[in-house]
Image (cartoon, coloured by chain):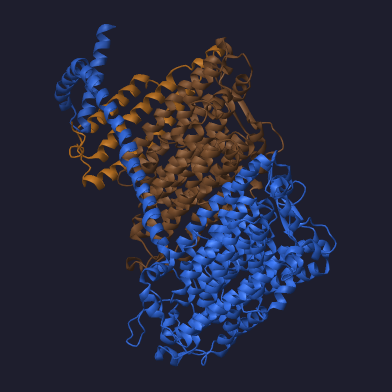
Chain colours: A blue, B orange, C brown
Amino acid sequence: MIVTFIFIILICPLASFTFFAISSLMGRKSSRQDLISTFAMLIAFACAFLLFMQVLGNPSIYKVAGASTHTTDWIQIDNVSLPMGFLFDSVTSIMLLVVTIVSSLVHIFSIGYMHGDPRYPRFFAYLSLFSFSMLFLIVADNLLGIYIGWELVGLCSYLLIGFWFEKDSAANACKKAFLTTRVGDVGMFIGMMMLFTKFHTFTLFGENGIFELVNNLESSDLTWLSIAGILIFCGAIGKSAQFPLHTWLPDAMEGPTPVSALIHAATMVAAGVYLAARMFPILTDVSSLFIAYVGGITAIFAATIAIVRWDIKRVLAYSTVSQLGYMMLAIGAGSYVAGLFHLTTHAFFKALLFLGSGSVIHALHVHHNDHDDGHHDDEHSDQPVERDGIPPEQDMRNMGGLRHKMPVTFWTMLIATLSISGVPFFFSGFWSKDEVLGATLERAMESGSAHYYILFFMALVAAGVTALYMFRLIFLTFTGQPRDQGMYEHAHESPKSMIIPLIILAVLSFPIVNKWSVKKYIEQPGQVHNHLAPEHANQFVLYAAAGSADHHDSTSHTAHKGHSPAHNIAMGLSIFVAGLGILLSALFYHWKTFSAETIANKFRGVHRILWNKYFIDEFYDGIIVRATIIGAKIFGGIDKYLVDGLVNLVAIIVNYIVAFLVGLFDNKVVDFLVNSVAGVTWKFGGRVRRVQTGVIQNYLFVILTGVILLIIIFRLLV
Amino acid sequence: MSNITLEHYLLISSILFTLGVFAVLTRRNAITILMGIELMLNSCNINFIAFSRFVKSPTTVGAGEVSLAIEGQIMALFVIVLAAAEAAVFLAIILSIYREFNSISPDETNTLKG
Amino acid sequence: MLLTSMIFIPLVGAIIVLLVPRDREDAAKWIAFLVTLIPLFLAVLLYFQYDPTSVEIQEVVETSWIKAFNIRYHTGVDGLSVTLILLTALLGPICVGASWKIEKGIKVYLSLFLLLETGMIGFFCALDLFLFYVFFELTLLPMYFLIGVWGGPRREYAAIKFFLYTLFGSVLMLIAMIAVYLNSSVDPGLRTFDIPTLISLAQTSGHALADPTFQIWAFLGFFIGFAVKVPIFPFHTWLPDAHVEAPTAISVVLAAILLKMGTYGLVRINFAMLPAGMDFFTNGLGRWGNALAILGVVNIIYGSLCALAQTDFKKLVAYSSIGHMGFVILGLAARNEAGVTGAILQMLNHGVISAMLFLLVGVVYDRAHHRDINGFGGLGAKMPIYTGITTLAFMASLGLPGLSGFVGEALSLLGAYSKFQLLTILSTIGIVVGAAYFLWTLQRVFLGDLNPKYEAIEEINMREIATLIPLGVLTIVLGIWPHFAIEMFRNSVVGLPLQ
């Protein structure tokens, strides 16, 4: 039953892509690819929804962590066996639901947004392929399967970022995205190899799964396990754009906006969080702290960059990076539930923000360049100029006052913004963010470790900064006076196919839906360090072993937010910083009490660092990329001149020596003989050749003469 | 009539053969040369037939009867077939030569001259 | 019978093709095409007839050949051979299809190609060391002419380099072979070239063949012979030159099959027949214990970095081959199930993928008449299908999961990691660099603004698609369900002296 549903969920999008691939190979344009893909996704969504309902009604599924439902041997050679199977538990069911919902809505949105693009069918085919890969990643029951889905979503991300590949910036961005994530993936693969060498399996749950076998480790293996955990987490660093591999995600905004919403906000980048959550049981203290630090640093680091961006999509991109950092922080702080909770709420409101920005871009784009599939030829005189390499319709300096023109977009985006900023009580983002902060503070209080206090502080600051830059975006875009009258005049509300997804996502940004889904039904698994390191045993109380009939007991630590002092403190502080952020934002950008320019000029150094994104891109391009290419050139040169040169040199030397020796013998002995024979033959031939007259009768005459002579001689002799 | 002996036949055939040789050696036309060759072949045929008539067949010696030596006649038939085949090849060659040199005189087709 | 006809039908075909009248050269192509279909058909038949559950060598044909030295015509197949024979037979018609546009001396070209096919199939079937050597050398001659006559501007240089290099290797191999022969028995009448016999002798303790010192030296002799063919650093420099100069179809065969002859030899002779020698170079102990693994890693990293530096499309693919063969060496050096299975799978996958890559380079070369990567740009807009297939091939080659390249690489690395941790981690650099050069190439050729020179470039045509589709399908199928291949050679892997 469950397996059938999972199969349907996987096959629908795959079939849609296959249909496109085969028909385009046969030279036919599948004109209704949009409907096929959307329909396939809706079926997948229906199945995911049914599955989810089944989980709700059947505690035995979500009680058992990691119920593997279907396995088959993918690779089997005597002692080495790599089975593939589906994993179905509460986390899977929620992830399936999130992905299918967002994907379906993005499909619908794209029908309007991508309308008129010359590669319109291809876009939907790629979306289908992506959905398949992402769903496969979620249902895989072993690390290798996750890795397969992991790389496939990377491929789709590559294809979709480079969808408008005529633009050099897009071509560069897709390459960068693939390569940067690949660096992380290699780390992940090494981690996988470490685990495989130890446990001889990639399967996660079950009797012979990694999570069971990990309990047999000695405490001396703790360091080894930490390293393995961190290496696997490297994959998540790449895919979820965590510091220091975050640089690809902002560049990935070169892709069409629905792609940014689906892949680079809601699903693929969250796969890193999903991975970290899945690997939760093998995370040791050290690797947890590492994850927490990566998450914390990323959260604050990306948030600060977002403050100074002018490109509406880039702001959202950095915001995504920052929010992903939050999720990582939650997992690092030991709250699996908080991480996944934030993942779910974030998927909806961030997808909404991106689709909303897409709606804005669409409105402004159509105006100055009718369906120009992404090219921006700035030859018309009334064109707004491109500043700092930002396309004019994405530049917030050209916007303002749009709320009158696009009310639905404005209101839905405002809801998402309130949610992400952590405005209390009515918005899902508040609850999930509070969950993360509370979990961090709680970990800090319980372990008494300064690390987690620092991390809590960082997360708190990041929360304030988030509110600041998000409201900056709203104020700059929708309120005030239009700054580009020409663009404003032609702006219009988007068509229904784009509006409806916005409204649905806005509904999903209210807390009831998310609380209902995530908080109740995810159970936190135990972690390995509790078995291995006795000094941390006291913490294990928090994650009391599963199996209790009442899930509220087993997740007592996280399920009852606000019940522990840590959570109350965290909630209070989070409301405070969010309010502060919004207030600051309003002072600067709405009431214009202070001028942002003045501040920027005053702290020019800081502004410059933020504007240049801490110079990390420069560091990568200037040092790492260049060093690699120079290294490659050196190797190429070595190969061409040194190695091959040596070969040629050997050939020449051998040639020379042999020629010399042979030549000596040749000249003195062989040549003499040969030459004399040749000379004689030559001279003789010169004489004899005259006999050859070429006239056949002469030959016959000679023959006749010869015959007569022979007869005479014969007569004489006999 | 019975005094036509083997020698008569041989004489005729020698004359024919000589004529043939003469034609082959002196004519300036390849067709005539071919005719000379045919003459020589036919003179051989006459020889074969004559010998087959006048020589006892070795295969029938044991029986004490005189019979025709059939081998000579077979040989003559062979030669006729051979001559036909040879003529075909020869004419084909002559045609090619004519295309190449615009002449069938052996004097002019001396490109094999050393 | 199946094997014998498979070996010699191309030879008969080669003669028939030569007899086709000059004004009917099209017929020669069709005849050659049909002739190559026969071994393919037979190979498929063999695939179904072959019993992968048995550890026995199957389809054995054995007759006496040169009695004086006890040389026998002994052929037979195990799973590894069947896999490679299938690959060879599949590439036959594909290469003939890819040679359709050759004008110069097509008859001779095709008959040389068919002769080459005889050599290759024979090589994979031979079970007598002498026969093995004969077929090994038999591939050399047609290859020499195919590169030297139908190649690019520096064809003579490339052909001679290829010839001499390989000959240098095979001389050492010949010496090792004779040494093995002479050591196989004290009694001159009982000496043998028979590979299965030699394998069992080499494992009999106390026998002269089992002597470790002897095995190490013999190993070296064979190894260098095969290393040139694989090619393993530093014997690789013939490869880029040969590839660049060779016509498309010949590059395909060169990369897909001829390189596999090297690795096949390593498995068949060095691995199976000389276990003590193998152990000496792969046990991870002492000065030489890591030698083979190091060579593999050097191949991977060096090949990938060199590929990154290339601007010639074909040279890039050639260097990428060097990198990919490194995974084979690394997997073999691991000497465990995962590693060896990965290595063999990688042999097969590289055969399929590199064949695709060279065919694809040929497609664009036929249109643009140059191979300078920087001289293209934006072709994706004009040739969407070609771009799609190229992306598939590139992705398969850079090891994207779901496509066949990944499975082989991943298994080789998994196997190798349990033995050579550091070296394996080092080799993963090759994975990143591999992605880098393929994506960079993809960008420079297909993405970005369209180069105005290629405004009117033609899309890939049906004939070219037809040559690519079987390979593309195989890439996907083996990526999703590698069992198809693994099942074939599982018993050959288990039969090897693993650790």
Whether residue A613 sits left or right of residue C60 in the image: it is left
- Residue nearest the observer in this picture, B107 or B53: B107
Query: How far across and down, in percent of the image, does residue A133 sit?
Result: 62, 62
Against A495, residue C54 (above or below) is above
Quadrant for the C terminus of chain C, please. top right
Query: How far across and down, in percent of the image, does residue C451 sit?
Result: 34, 66
- Residue nearest the observer in this picture, B70 or A564: A564
Q: Quadrant of residue B98?
A: top left
- Residue nearest the observer in this picture, C389 or A382: A382
**Is residue A474 shown to the viewer in this render?**
yes
Query: How far across and down, in percent of the image, does residue C1 sit?
Result: 63, 34
**Is residue C17 shown to the viewer in this render?**
no
Tell me the residue at 35%/24% (across/down): B9
Against A58, residue B51 (above or below) is above
Whether residue A550 sits left or right of residue A322 in the image: it is right
- Residue nearest the observer in this picture, C216 or A581: A581
Q: Quadrant of residue C161?
A: top left
